[in-house]
C-alpha cells in the first residue's frame, strides 16, 4: 500500500486490515469524522481510532496485536501486599467520564509533563461517553478515601474487553483496576492494542492479527457481566 486510504463520509466500509501500513505500524485509513456506530464497526474488525487534535481521525490495526489473557495477569510480591492492604475500593461505571478526563490529563515524568493522554480529544470523549450510555463503554475505577485515584476504561464486545487507557495518581491504583478486571470481571481476553514493556510486566503478549480477529468473531455471541 503506497498511500493512505480515506474513508468517505458516505462510505462506512473499512478497507481490509491487510491493507494497513507497516510503517507506522498498523495505520489503515483516515476519516474526517467519528461516531459511535463507526467505532463499534471498527472494533468488531480489529480496528481502533487513535489521533490527536488537528489531525484527521486515524484508524489502526497493528500486527501483531498485544493482548492479555486474564489468567496470565502477573502479580508481583509488592503488588500482592498492596492488594492485601485493602487500600482501594474498586467500582465500575460510576465515573466513566471522570476516568476518561483523568486519562487525558497531562502526566508528569522526571523531565516534565509528557503527551500521554493528548489523543483523547473532545470528540473522542463525547463519542465514548455515548458508547458508555448505550452499554458498550465501561470504566473500572480505583477509589481511596472517597477520591478517584486510578482506573481504566474501554469497550466491551462479546466477552472481550478492549482496553483504551488507564491512569493512576496513587501507586498501584491502575494496576488494581486491571487486577479487578482480570479476576472479578474475567473477560475472555483484554485487548491492549500495542505492546509496551509495562504491559509485558503485567503478563501481556502478542498474537497474530488474523488470530485476534478470529477470536473477536468467535466470541461475539458471548456476554460479559460488568459488575
Image (tube, rainbow, N blue to C red):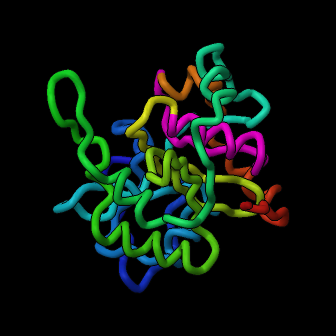
Q: Position of residue 170 (x, y in %)?
A: 42, 35
Q: Residue furthest front?
A: 145
Q: Position of residue 92 (x, y in %)?
A: 62, 59
How many discs appear?
0
**Residue 168 appears in the figure:** yes
Q: Quadrant of the C terminus?
A: bottom right
Give above or below for 214 relative to 196: below
Question: Is-magenta flag for residue 180?
Answer: yes
Q: Residue at x 53, y 42 (%)?
A: 193
Q: Is residue 194 left or right of residue 122?
A: right
**Residue 65 appears in the figure:** no
Q: Residue at x 50, y 67 (%)?
A: 14
Say which quarter of the image contains residue 49. Answer: bottom left
Where are the magenta residues, as a range? 173-197
Give above or below for 8 relative to 86: below
Q: Residue furthest top?
A: 77
Q: Position of residue 223 (x, y in %)?
A: 81, 64
Q: Is residue 15 left or right of residue 216?
A: left
Give above or below for 226 relative to 162: below
Give above or below for 210 relative to 81: below
Question: Is-magenta flag for residue 185?
Answer: yes
Q: Residue furthest bottom?
A: 10
Q: Residue at x 61, y 45 (%)?
A: 191
Q: Position of residue 175 (x, y in %)?
A: 56, 34
Q: Residue at x 23, y 34 (%)?
A: 108
Amino acid at each position: 500500500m503506497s498511500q493512505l486510504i480515506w474513508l468517505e463520509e458516505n462510505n462506512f466500509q473499512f478497507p481490509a486490515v491487510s491493507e494497513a501500513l507497516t510503517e507506522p505500524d498498523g495505520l489503515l485509513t483516515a476519516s474526517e469524522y467519528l461516531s459511535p456506530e463507526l467505532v463499534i464497526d471498527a472494533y468488531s474488525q480489529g480496528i481502533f481510532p487513535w489521533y490527536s487534535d488537528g489531525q484527521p481521525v486515524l484508524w489502526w490495526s497493528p500486527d501483531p496485536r498485544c493482548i492479555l489473557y486474564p489468567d496470565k495477569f502477573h502479580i508481583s510480591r509488592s503488588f500482592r501486599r498492596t492488594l492485601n492492604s485493602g487500600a482501594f475500593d474498586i467500582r465500575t461505571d460510576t465515573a466513566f467520564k471522570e476516568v476518561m478526563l483523568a486519562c487525558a490529563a497531562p502526566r508528569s515524568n522526571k523531565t516534565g509533563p509528557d503527551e500521554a493522554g493528548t489523543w483523547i480529544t473532545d470528540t473522542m470523549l463525547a463519542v465514548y461517553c455515548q458508547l458508555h450510555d448505550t452499554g458498550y463503554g465501561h470504566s473500572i475505577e480505583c477509589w481511596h478515601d472517597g477520591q478517584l485515584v486510578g482506573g481504566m476504561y474501554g469497550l466491551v464486545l462479546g466477552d472481550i474487553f478492549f482496553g483504551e487507557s488507564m491512569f493512576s495518581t496513587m501507586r498501584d491504583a491502575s494496576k488494581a483496576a486491571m487486577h479487578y478486571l482480570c479476576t472479578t470481571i474475567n473477560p475472555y481476553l483484554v485487548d491492549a492494542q500495542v505492546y509496551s514493556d509495562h504491559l509485558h510486566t503485567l503478563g501481556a503478549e502478542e498474537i497474530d492479527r488474523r488470530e485476534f480477529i478470529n477470536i473477536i468473531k468467535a466470541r461475539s455471541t458471548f456476554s460479559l457481566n460488568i459488575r
